[in-house]
Image (cartoon, rainbow, N blue to C red):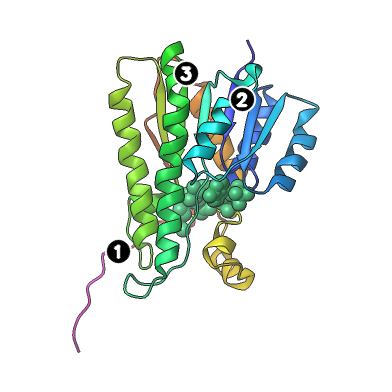
Amino acid sequence: MQKTICITGATSGFGKACAERFATDGWQMILTGRRTDRLQALSQELGAAVPVHIAELDVRDFKAVEAMVAALPEAFKYIDVLVNNAGLALGLAGADKTDIADWDTMIDTNVKGLCYLTRCILPHMVQRNQGHIINMGSIAGNYPYPGGNVYGATKAFVKQFSRNLLTDLNHTKIRVTNIEPGLAESEFSVVRFHGDQQKADAVYKGTEPLRPVDIAEIVHWVTSVPAHVNINTVEVMPVCQSCGPLAIHRDE
Ligand code: NDP
Ligand code: 8X3
C-alpha cells in the first residue's frame, strides 16, 4: 500500500530534501510551508512521480493547523510519517540584548507549532495503531553556545517532548524519533541573520557542513528499519565540527 508522509517546512532545506528523497521511493506526500510559490514549484517537480497535496500553512496558527488536517482529501487522510521540520533560529544576541519578538517567534514555531501538528495528526495514528513522528531537534538542544539561549532551549524542548511522546504512546506501535543535526547549510543562517547573506556565508566558510540531502537520508533511514525498531535519537555533525571546551572567565 502507498505510504503517506506529511512534511512541515517543505519549501527549503531539510524539508524539501526529505520530500525529494521520499518521492524517489514512491511515497505520496503532504507538503506544507508559508511560501506557496515554492510549494507549487515542488509539487510540479515531484507531482509527476507521486501524488502531492500542498497546503500553505503557518504552523504557529493552531486553527489553521486544525483546518489543514480536517481538510485533507480522503486519499491523504491517513498519515504514516509526520516530519515536524518547520523551524528557525533568529539572532545570536546575548539574553540581555535580544529582540523579544525573535524569542516569541522561535517559541511559537519550534515549540508550539511542533506540538500543534503532533496533536492534530496523532489521533488518526493512534486509531490505526500505526505511524511515526519525526521531530527536527538540534545539537543546540544538547550543547549550549553563546547566543543560542532560546533557540537551544526550544530544541531541548523538542528532545524531551519526543521522549515523553514515546512514553504516552508506549501502548501503541507508533514510533517517535528526534533528529539532532549540527552545522548544516540551508537557508537556516540567512533566516537567523534576518536576510544578511554575507553573515550567513561566513558561518560555512572553510567548512564542509552537512547538506540537506544528508539529513533527508537519515530521516528516510529511521523510517526504513523494521517496524519493531524505534530509533529514539540521531545526533549528527559534520566531521569538521566537535563539542567546544567548557569556558572559564577569569578576572584580570
Ligand atoms: P531552512 O530555513 O532552509 O528551512 C526552514 C523551513 O521551515 C522552511 O521551509 C520554512 O518555510 C519553514 N518554516 C519556518 N517558519 C515556519 C512557520 N511559521 N510555519 C511554517 N513553516 C515555517 O532551514 P533548515 O532546513 O536548515 O531547518 C529545518 C529544521 O532543522 C529547523 O527546525 C531547524 O531548526 C532545524 N535544524 C537546522 C540546522 C541547520 O544548521 N541548518 C541544524 C539543526 C537543526 P516557509 O518560510 O516557507 O514557511
Ligand atoms: C542548528 C545548529 O549549531 O547553529 O540547529 O544551533 S546550530
Classify mark 3: helix, strand or loop: helix
Q: From the viewer's perspective, tell me whether residue 236 is left or right of residue 167.
A: right
Residue with the mark numbered 1: 245
> What percent of the width, then of the height, locates residue 2?
64, 15
Residue at image position (41%, 44%) is 112
On residue 72, the disc is 2
The amino acid pointed to by label 1 is: Pro
Report the residue that reaches farthest toward the left.
251
The amino acid pointed to by label 2 is: Leu
Along the polypeptide, which appears first: circle 2 or circle 3? Answer: 2
Q: Quadrant of the N terminus?
A: top right
The amino acid pointed to by label 3 is: His
- Magenta stretch, residue numbers: 245-252
Residue with the mark numbered 3: 124
> What percent of the width, then of the height, locates residue 198?
62, 72
Residue 101 seen in the current view: yes
Along the polypeptide, which appears first: circle 2 or circle 1? Answer: 2
